[in-house]
Image (cartoon, rainbow, N blue to C red):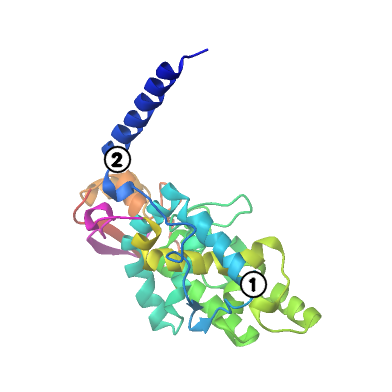
Amino acid sequence: MQTPKKLLFIVGIIAVSGLFIRALIPNSYKSEMRVGTANYFPESIDFSEEKAPLQITDVRERLDRELLINANLHSTTTLILKRANRIFPVIEPILAANGVPDDMKYLAVIESGLAHVSSSAGARGIWQFMPDTAKEKGMEVTDAVDERYHLQKSTEAACRYLKTAKEKLGSWTLAAASYNVGMTGIQKQIDAQKVNNYYDLALNEETSRYVFRILALKAIMKNPKQFGFNLYPNDLYAPIPIRIVSVDSTITDLPSFALGQGINYKILKLHNPWLRDKKLPNPTRKKYELEIPTAGY
């Protein structure tokens, strides 16, 4: 058994070591969310100018849950904040041009973390379209080309879906929820429960959390420092300047094509993730636009 003096000595060493290690962590990555105070929970919040009824106990607590979870997913939320600096400038003008609320960009955040991910169910890209839905919304999905990975085209397709959902269901909040469970799924619950407000509906676990996750990420991303994310401008991923090369014929060897553009195949794929093969068949002479970076590669 340790003597009291030895125990105090060991505790002191551990404490000093902890302070030393913390001092080595850059300030931009230190997170000190003030949980348990009034500082982190918003007085009010809306989605697409549709106010969330925070006076309802379960609504307030469901939002609190998502705020706490996402504010404490330090690495994940930090990466989202970094990526948003590059991705949002592409998404925002497309939403605006299509008459879709700017808040819908946070839907993309919770769907994919603003990365071109693949789900076990078969959804792909930043907007997580399933193959059949992507084709219905005008995207090309083949072994060689998958436009679910095309940020501009998938955002346009998401706008088409969300506008249709808004017209059918009556609110942007319900339209967002339908992105998770489908328009038919939401309409069935509206008919069965005889209420037409997202916050009044009893839904499955995932859909009942869906809009609250959007609200939480919106709150955190609009006020990251309030939630302990102290990122500096040079911590964020900067947009990369590009030039566009249009092609309307088959490219049999994309690695050689890339070298001819002054880059390599890896860089070509990073900037054009919708290219899914080492060739681009084009028997119909469809016009494709390829992004070629002019710096940062």
Which residue is situated farthest in the top direction here? 1
Residue 285 within the segment the image draws in magenta: no
From the image, tell me which residue sits under label 1: 57
Q: Decide whether residue 231 is among the magenta residues.
A: yes
Between 158 and 216, the residue placed more toward the observer is: 216
Could you say whether the residue bearing mark 2 is in a helix, strand or loop? loop
Judged left or right of residue 207, residue 250 is left
The quadrant holding residue 66 is bottom right
- Residue corresponding to mark 2: 25
Which of the two residues, 147 or 207, is positioned nearer the viewer here?
207
Q: Tell me the kind of residue under disc 2.
A: Ile
Residue 179, x across and y down, in percent: 60, 70
Q: Is residue 238 left or right of residue 56?
A: left
Amino acid marked by disc 1: Thr
Residue extent of the magenta highlight? 229-249
Question: Is residue 42 positioned above or below 254 on the image?
Answer: below
The reply to whether the C-beta atoms of the residues labelled 2 and 1 are less than 8 Å apart is no
Mark 2 surroundings within 10 Å by alpha-carbon count, few (fewer than 14), some (14 through 19), many (20 or more): few
Q: Residue at x 42, y 77 (%)?
A: 102
Which is in the foreground here, disc 2 or disc 1?
Answer: 1
Farthest residue, direction front: 4
